[in-house]
Image (cartoon, coloured by chain):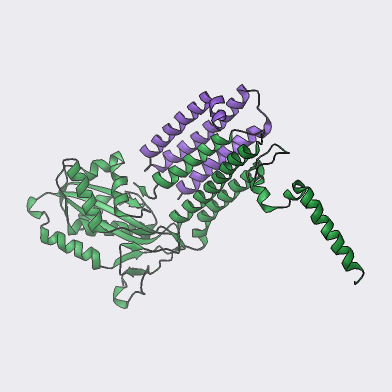
Amino acid sequence: MLENIKENRIEYFILMVAVIAFIILIYIFRFNKDVLILLSGLGSVLYIFWGIIHHYIRGKLTKNIVYEYSLFGLLSFLLFFVVLSF
Amino acid sequence: MKDLQPKQEKEGSGVVRYWRKHPKSIEKYQFVYRFLPKDDKKKRADFLDNKAILIYCAVILFVTLAFRFIPKFAPGVLGYASNISVSDLLKYTNKKREENGASNLRLNAKLSSAAEKKAQDMFADGYWAHVAPDGKEPWDFIISEGYDYIYAGENLAKNFSTSKEVVEAWFNSPSHKSNLIGKNYDEVGFAVVNGVMDGYETTLVVQMFGRPRQPSMLADTKEEQAVLEKSQIKAVTSVAGATEKTENLNEPPSEEQKDPEENNTVVVATNPQETKVVVDVTKATKTVSLAFGGFVGSLLAVDVLYSRKKGIRKFTGLTLAHIVIIAMVIASIWFILRPGLVV
């Protein structure tokens, strides 16, 4: 696991910064559901792009990997959406 | 039959011997195998492949749609359980005012009555806004109760679980905050009314602020105490719309509790603060989200640990990144997201 983090140090750093920023934004707008839905959608799209760009830079981008990141992005959004839509 | 049995036993034992010699050949028939990454295919567990994730997404979407449509066919089945009281609302409102250098508000009977009429009007006409579909404004309710004001304001909330959450939500919304800690107000009135709105059993909270034109009209301690006592023992009436069914929370309404002037059923609950529902939407959606998130997150963690132990190298996306994202979603839902809306 540590090897994996060392190998992808910059990507993980960007991801962690984005995650912390996302949590701060979620906390700030915790009472505004419209903004929260927008934030979770944006966060999911960013994550999909993060994954695709990471694999593209390393020349390991395949259709399956694009599907994988898209589905994990969609899953993350839906996990938020089911709570936020009520 | 007698001839076949020894042959079958022989074959059976042969198969068992084969499986013992080649454990890999049986793996794919074992349920646990679905949870573990595969060395031969360089893939994650079956329950983590793209098809499985797509199925989880479809199930979550189905649950969301079901929770949207159930209230249309069975109003009142789904709802928001709450435990909100006027005394707590007053306590938290005044606490916020104190923290922000504003004077304490006193409960006023006329403002409380106006707030309750507003809440009943919203249930009756099926709206949730400051201005009613017929154009009636908050001030109309206040004036109709005989409260002559210089300044007046209104905050609304619905679907919250506790009084503290209601006040916190108002405080975190700039427009509501200006009412909540507004120095132009001396008095306040609250209504906490249970009923069915858009098919969901819910609790509406109305907060009305005011400063009377004549200082002599200000409520005294005795009036405040009377309003508080009334709110604790008084039956809250929930007026259901013509197409909506309202449930009695504790006992059926008596003849005296029915409003003769209204065609709608007036339902009385002996404990107005507490709403119990068949299915609590807040808990149900949170459970669905956390269950799927937890399941996928755990499988990803197993994937990392098992792959490391067995030295499996897979040609997939970064598992650790997926874990970070799923963990962030779970943490946000668990610790940050709260139910309720304010307007």
Residue B130 lies, with reference to residue B70, above or below; the image says above
Q: On the rendered structure, is B296 left or right of B332? A: right
Residue B80 position by quadrant: bottom left
Left or right: A39, with B21 as reference point: left
- Asked if residue A49 shows in the view, the reply is no
**Residue at the bottom extreme, as displayed:** B255
Marks counted in the figure total 0
Q: Tell me, yes or no, if residue B54 can be seen here.
A: yes
Residue at 46 percent across and 33 percent down: it is: A19
**Image quarter hosting the N terminus of chain A:** top right
Residue furthest right as drawn: B3
Image x and y of residue A71, in percent: 60, 39
Q: In terms of depth relative to the viewer, which is nearer, B146 or B305?
A: B305
The vertical placement of B54 against B317, above or below, is below
Q: Nearer the viewer, residue B260 or B68?
A: B68
Q: Nearer the viewer, residue A3 or B106?
A: A3
Would residue B87 appear left or right of B326 to someone viewing this image? left
Instruction: Name the spot of residue B238 as percent of width and height, x first.
Output: 34, 64
Which residue is at a point 56% across and 25% down the rendered structure image? Answer: A7
Chain identifier of the green chain: B
Residue B130 percent location from the top left of the image? 32, 48
Residue located 89% across and 64% down the image: B7
Q: Is residue B10 above or below residue B252?
A: above
The percent position of residue B122, horizontal first and vertical second, equals: 35, 56
Q: Which chain is purple?
A: A
In the image, A82 versus B256, the foreground residue is A82
